[in-house]
Amino acid sequence: MIRATGAILATIAALWAFAVAGAPADAMQGAIQKILYVHVPAAVGAYLGFLTTALCGALYLRSGAERWDRLAISAAEIGVVFCSLNIATGPIWARGTWGHWWAWDPRLTLTLLLWFIYLAYLLLRGFTEGSERTARFAAVYALLGALAIPLNYFAIRLFGGAAMHPDNLQRGSLGPGMGWPFALGLLAATAAFAHLLALRFDLESRRVEEARALAQERRE
Amino acid sequence: MNAFLAVLWKDLLQEWRSRDRLVAMLVFSALVIVVFHFALPGGAGAQTRSFAPGLLWVAYVFAALLGLGHAFAIELENDALAGLALAPAERGWIFLGKWAANVAILGLAQAVTAVVFGVVFEVDLLPVAGRFALVAVLGNIGLCAIGTLAAAVAVRTRFRELLLPLLVLPLLWPVLSGAVRATADLVATGRMGFEPIQLLIVADAAYLIVSFVSFEYVLDE
Amino acid sequence: MTAPAIAVRGLEKRFGFAVALASIDLTIPPGRSLAVLGPNGAGKSTLLRLLAGLARPSAGTVEIGGQRAHGREARARVGLVGHATFLYPALTARENLIFAGRLHGVAEPAARAAELLEEAGLADAADRPVGGFSRGMAQRVAIARGLVHDPAVLLLDEPFTGLDRRSAERLAERLARLRGERRTLLLVTHDVVSAARLADAAVVLARGRIALQNPGPLEAADLERALAAAEAA
């Protein structure tokens, strides 16, 4: 599984890097616009991450099978990294184009809120004792967090700050020659997420197995 | 349904006996309002009045966090939480009982705090009292829905007082933004649009339903 | 109940990597009383809490009267008197019992509370906050709480701990009466004399497993030996 996702990632990433390097610089923003090829895909990873975490949480509550919880924590850890990357690259781009580090732009705000939800989820896991209770509590919180995402979206849409984000998803809003690197970026993010998830899940499974074996040994 | 009424009655009775939760919440939120007043430049000037509604809701949230933590701290003595878990009832009703008691107590605190707020910031809430009460109640409902569930979770972790605000605040944004926006509109123009109310109703309903259903898993050992 | 009152098959309970209970098989027909003995940490309390429906098994099944223990029907039939009393110190004995009654869907909680308080000999202390009660009195209220919904199965976790001689005597009499009422009793205790007196059969747990099953009739000396063997192992 890991080898498969790794191979796919390597291929797409290579194509993507090539495409980004070859993409034309934006007429108005200059070369700094290229950071968007990282910024937007990172958002994909962030949201994919939390949705996976919430879904795995729900599956854990229904079945009680520990593997869902292992997948949930793996997805959360990978997702928070993507989320952090998105939030870090946002201001860098903003400073380069609008002149200030931060603006309460709707999408950035939404992702910032997601980042806080991730943090709360990870802290909750860290502070709860007992792996079964941790898994259960984390799953419940992930469900609430997943609910918060669309609610936050509506809240922001109603009262949102200055809409300074270019709407890249509409046809024609990107300049010529930018379509491919952009699309590849989204694919690369998805592939990266899948690969990292597989790696982390494998690591988690091995950690659990070793700890179990150690506990078994200590008992005998 | 029995369980809902039983828990509501019990919580209100306990609060009536000691009144410590309500007093603490009132003192705390009044203090917050006064501190804000002094901390802001220009005191009760026009500029301050424009973001005063936000401050009022900050005071409400702080008071709520205090009260919510207490709501489950009282269940820790003598393992009373297990006593609740033993009930042959749909556990969501136990959640609702706790939630309702929290709403009632917070509501009382909100009313008194609003008066203090009106006096300190020289904001006249009387002409919009009815609509403000509606906003306050809707905000209260959402805050307590998230908070009751989060408190039930936090109370059985390390550093529960620290974890509770960390769990509640990221989820609170839809409720808070709707409530603050509506309150700000009322204070500034005496009218409020339907969108904030709509957001509040949707968020409240969503959080209540999910919390009701997932409480089953929270009460397990 | 035609199904066995308590039926446990292949029960396993893990907390993380620690195995609290493993391969537990137990069947108790209605009306019988079972003593559960064993050294500290053997898993006795865990077993009781699983029977009371407070937690889900990691593997295997736990059934009360043919229903899954972790469910509403089963919980309606089980009363638990645990290590802790489940009582609210600020509320009176009467209020605590009325609350428990309402929680368990009892038809007339106030009347039931009065009845239980009378039976427990606590009628005069009924309207005093439980926080001021002695251990013995609090224990009596806790037992009343366990019985508020007239459960067919009563689980008691070391009820004699911390009681003076008089209270312990009174408790033993109470349990003997309950046994006579054809309830199914499960008594976790260290006290082999009470166990022999109050139970029909016994089971000794050690390190999460059943070390010994004694189908009775019980002799204190036998139980003492079994317990010592389990502790030594």
Image: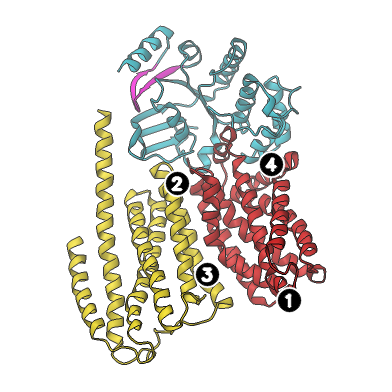
Chain colours: A yellow, B red, C cyan
Left or right of A67: which side holds C144? right
Give the spatial CA distance, label 4 vs label 2.
30 Å
Task: Residue B53: give x, y in percent of width and height.
Answer: 69, 68
Question: Could you tell which of marks 1 and 4 lies nearer the N-terminus?
Answer: 4
Q: Chain of mark 3?
A: A
Q: Does the CB distance between marks 4 and 3 fall below 8 Å?
A: no
Q: Is residue A154 magenta?
A: no
> Do the CB atoms of the residues marked 1 and 2 lie less than 8 Å apart?
no
Amino acid at pointer 1: Ala
Residue density around tag 1, few if under 14, some if 14–19, many if 20 or more, within 10 Å? some
Residue highlighted by disc 4 = B10
- Measured in 3D between alpha carbons, the distance from the residue under mark 3 to the one under mark 1, in whole angstroms, is 25 Å
Q: CA distance from mark 1 to mark 4?
A: 41 Å
The outermost residue toward the right is: B126
Say which of marks 2 and 3 sits in front: 2
Q: Nearer the viewer, residue C8 or A144?
A: A144
Task: Give the residue number, with chain letter if any, for mark 3.
Answer: A152
Mark whose residue sits in front, 1 or 4: 1
